[in-house]
Amino acid sequence: MTLTINRRSFATLAGAGAISAALPIRYAHAAEHTFKIGTNVPASHPLNIHLTKAAEQVKLETNGRFEFQLFPNNQLGADSDMLSQLRSGALECFLNSGVNVLSTIIPAAAISGVGFAFKDYPALWGAMDGKLGAHLRSQITRGGFVVMDKIWDNGFRMITNSARPIVQPEDLKNMKIRVPVSALWLSLFRSLGASPTGLNFAEVYSALQTKVVDGQENPPAIISAAKLFEVQKYCSVTNHMWDGWWFLMNRRSWGQVPADLQAIVTRVVNDACIAERAEVASQNISLQKELAAAGLIFNEVDPAPFRDTLSKAGFYKEWRGKFGEEPWALLEEAVGKLA
């Protein structure tokens, strides 16, 4: 069974190459500013669908003066490669998780991924669109990047595996689970008793297929778009971590764009982000039905025992020390005491 993320929008992505090729509007002159965007998820993911729509809108509103070209699904390399390209100026835009490779440069960016911190979307957006998000953007800016105001939604993450349902923390004991290359992810799953392995996303399907690892953890949209349901049996709705993408730009490249065009690009991109959030939240529910029909066996999870296990293992205490008092206080202001 083949699943699609958004059947109406996906039809516009045929070919999934540089998005400018699909635009219906023709301009007499080449764009004055062409910015490449790199992402690490398939073209059918809502992230890329709404980036495509944003690119069309930007080109229309700037009368062809500014153009985005989208390269989804790690076409430009793994996350670490794209971040390096972004820093050098070889890539103008990169959407990256704060918990992933960005945190190797800006450690505070990973705080949005603290295990079992956010109980729901209202708590999450209150933090990320509020004081915590503002603090993180200031840190990213100091790190040398331009960052848009809104963070895009990758969703709350679930655990899939080919061995057994995850109901209690004990079910994770010694399970080989793939996680992104991130100290926070590794720490979280080690604290829960699993045996995590850091792998770039491009390697996940083959690692699951060949049983190099037993499982992985991702939101429903990625489980579907990357067809991970083909090589996994169980899906446990742990919602153990939230993850999102910061829209990052190379500072030198952005500085060469006139203020009037910057204003249009910023508004359109942030509006597209809000639309993407709404679609991901809706699909988190609808995709569970489709994935179940494709063969995944779902089970609900009580987060309390997992949170207790993390507290006893010293997870929250360790990361409070690593992140520092200011960002941790902003996190707890939004979600309550964690430990």
Image (cartoon, rainbow, N blue to C red):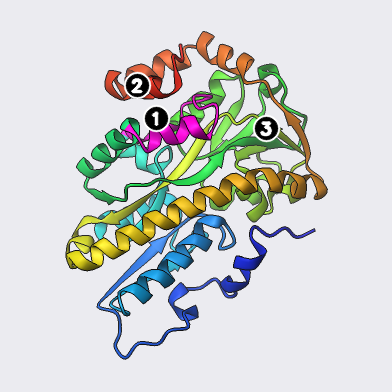
- The residue tagged 3 is 237
Q: Is residue 311 left or right of residue 34?
A: right
As shown in the figure, which amino acid type bears the numbered disc 1? Ile
Q: Residue at x 60, y 42 (%)?
A: 219
**Circles 3 and 1 in contact, beta carbons < 8 Å:** no
Question: Looking at this view, is 168 or 259 the one in front?
Answer: 259
As shown in the figure, which amino acid type bears the numbered disc 3? Val
Q: Is residue 205 above or below residue 212?
A: below
Which of the two discs, 3 and 1, labels the residue nearer the N terminus?
A: 1
- Residue projecting furthest to the bottom: 28
How many residues crowd around disc 1 within 10 Å: few (fewer than 14), some, or many (20 or more)? many
Q: CA distance from mark 3 to mark 2?
A: 26 Å
Which of the two discs, 3 and 2, labels the residue nearer the N terminus?
A: 3
Q: Is residue 83 left or right of residue 282?
A: left
Q: Which mark is residue 328?
A: 2
Q: CA distance from mark 1 to mark 2?
A: 8 Å
- The residue tagged 1 is 111
Q: Residue at x 64, y 32 (%)?
A: 176
Q: Is residue 115 magenta?
A: yes
**Circles 1 and 2 in contact, beta carbons < 8 Å:** yes
Q: Dot 1 lies on which element?
A: helix
| Residue 226 shows in this picture | no
Q: Is residue 18 above or below residue 244?
A: below
Span shown in magenta: 107-130
As shown in the figure, which amino acid type bears the numbered disc 2? Trp
Q: Position of residue 71 (x, y in %)?
A: 46, 66
Q: Quadrant of the N terminus?
A: bottom right
Q: Residue at x 70, y 47 (%)?
A: 286
